[in-house]
Structure formats: structure tokens, C-alpha cells
Image (tube, rainbow, N blue to C red):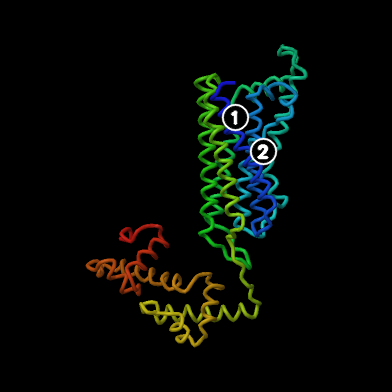
Amino acid sequence: MDTLTILLVILLAIGAIQGLIFGIVLCNILTIHKKANRFLAAILFFFTYRLIAEILHFFGLGRYDTLYYILLEFNWIYGALIYFFAASYVNPKFKLDRSQWIHFLPVIIEVSWSFFIKSQNFYWDGTRESLSWLGYWGYVVWMHYPTMYVIGGALIIYYSFKAKKILDHPPEISGYVLKPDQLGWIKRVVLVLRWFSIFFTAVTLVDYLFFDYAFKQFGYPIFIIMAVITYWLGLEGFSRRNQEAFKQVSIPSEKELNQLKTIAEKIETAMTAEKLYKNPELTVAMLSNAIDVKSYLVTKALTTVFQTKFNDYVNDYRFRELKSLIADPDNKKFTLLSLAFDAGFNSKASFIRTVKKLTGKSPKHLR
């Protein structure tokens, strides 16, 4: 075994060991994200399994020996695990019910098919006739074409987009308020796994189409990157093991909720009829005096009924007023900032921040 191979084996071993250790740690963390941590641990365990299988190959093990029949393929499970990891992280009440088990159907098919194909070696005597039609062509398609890798890559890409969608639009869970700023690392994990899958699939296809699997060095960067990702995933999960993306809130009774809805209607009326938002110095206390309701109830109505904060609520009205002012041809001679102040914004920074938050673009795009 040359020096380069030894270094490669050491790198893969470090990734596998760290993946196993971090996976075990994550499985034993009992926070609100317990289920999400276990899905992340599962990803780490399967990455570790794949790295160990590759290490064994360097020692001549797992190539048509007893281990060959034991080391089955699990390339099609990563997509579902990525999706469930994201879905459970944004939902503290997440349950893996019967309807969701279908997402594991691909890996059941892969494992079953892999076992069937490998079992053909018990019947093969060196001739095509010793195998059934399905056994022969199944072996050809499975072992001589990049079928399992292309499908596995496609599944990861598909589920990564499903995961991104649920992270961008998380469900509303009664009794919990999500902290959006805590989701950044999950989005990075999903993105990294997607791009790794794209790279892995592309390299596999290049090796097959142009080198007929002869250029084995193509596999080296893939498994090095897998080891690095395994190590990184473990660190990401471990460093945030006690971090919670939710804060629990009390659920109002039906009587209290009806009271808050009534207050919310008063707030809406005051804001639309009296245009209180045009006052740049508007505060919760001033709004409370305008509708004759205590300040804490106004705040509670905003967070419970409108699910927003006072400043965001008022600035949303100001933004709508600004768009109305921009649409008026008579206002073309005025600058955006002057119209923003006319709409009620009390500073340039507040105006820019609100526009970017609501549109994702800078104010100059408003016109």
C-alpha cells in the first residue's frame, strides 16, 4: 500500500470515527429537537458505513468475498433522511406516521435488489446461461452501469428541494414560535449535501461515459469530500446540540382568544381609518390610548392574532402607503425617501430595512 493510499485510508477513518462518535452523542440528546438530532445521526451513521466499506476495499475486503454479501447498498436512503431532518427540526410535534414511510420505499427496493444481484454469484458458473434473464440483465444494469448512483443522486437533489421548501415555509405549530435565525445552519447542511450529490453524480457519469470505470482516481476526491462532510456534519450538530429553534408560548383559552380578536379588529380599524401609522413617533402606548385598551393586550393581540411584532406591523402599513404614493403620477417629482417619510417611516434605515424584508430587494426597485 503506497503512501497516498495510506493517507487516504487515514482520512476516511478519521471521518468514519468522528461520524460514529457524533452520531451516538446526537442520539442521546433529549431536547425539543430530539427527533431531528436522530435523523442527523442516521445520516452520519450511513456516511460512516459507506466510508468503512470503502476502507475495507483498500485492504482487499468486500470484493466478492463473504463481506461482499453483507455490505449492501444504502445510497437511496439519504434523500429521505435529509428531508425528515429538516421537517422534524421545524416541527417539535413531528411524527413519522404511516403516510410518510413511503419515502423509505426507494431504499427498501435498493437493498432488496442489491441482495438479489449479489446472490447471483451463487448460481453463476461463468456462463450467461447459468443465470435467469432477470438475474443476468439485472446484474449488468446494476453492476456495469451507474444506475444506483444516478438514482441515489437524483433522490438527494429532489429531497433537498423539498427540505428547502419546508425550511422557507415552516408550518405554524400551536404553542410554539419559530426563531427563523436558527435555521441558517440547517439550510447550509441541505445545500452542501445537494451540491455534493451533484458533484458525486457528475463524476460517476464522467468516469463511466469517458473512462469506462478505468480511472479509479476519480473516486478519491469523492470519498475525501464525504469524510470531510461527515466530520463537518457531526461538528455542526454537536455544537448546536442544546440550541432550540423554538420558544414555547402559552395557548390562550377560547374566551381570551375571542377577546384578542376583538382588540385586533380595533387595531385594524384605527390603523386604516385614522392612519395612525403615518405618525413617525407612533408607539404601543399611543396605539393603546387610541383604542382605549391596555398596552400589554395590544402587544398580545399583535403576537397572537397577527403573529407579528408592533414595529413590523406598523411598517407593513407604511410600506403599503408608500406603494400607493409611488403609484400616484403626481408624486413622480418626489424622491423615494421623501415619500417614505410621508408614509410614516421615521428613518432612512427603517425604510430600507422594511423594504428589503418585505420584497427581498433594495428600495430602488420600487420604481
**Which residue is nearer to you in this view: 273 or 29?**
29
**Which residue is nearer to you in this view: 264 or 27?**
27
Mark 2 closeness class: few <14, some 14–19, many ≥20 residues within 10 Å: some
Gap between marks 2 and 1 measured at Cα = 30 Å
x, y percent for residue 253: 66, 77
Residue 246 got which mark?
Answer: none
- Indicate which label's residue lies in the foreground, 2 or 1: 1
Residue 228 vertical position relative to residue 259 in the rendered view, above or below: above
> Looking at numbered disc 1 in the image, what kind of residue is underneath it?
Val
* Secondary element at image label 2: helix
What residue is drawn where x is 34% and y is 69%?
A: 322
Q: N-terminal of the two: label 2 or label 1?
A: 1
Residue corresponding to mark 1: 9
Judge from the rendering whether residue 103 lies leftward or rightward of residue 311; answer left or right. right
> Looking at numbered disc 2 in the image, what kind of residue is underneath it?
Pro
x, y percent for residue 62: 69, 25
x, y percent for residue 251: 64, 73
* Secondary element at image label 1: helix
Residue corresponding to mark 2: 106
Q: Quadrant of residue 119?
A: top right
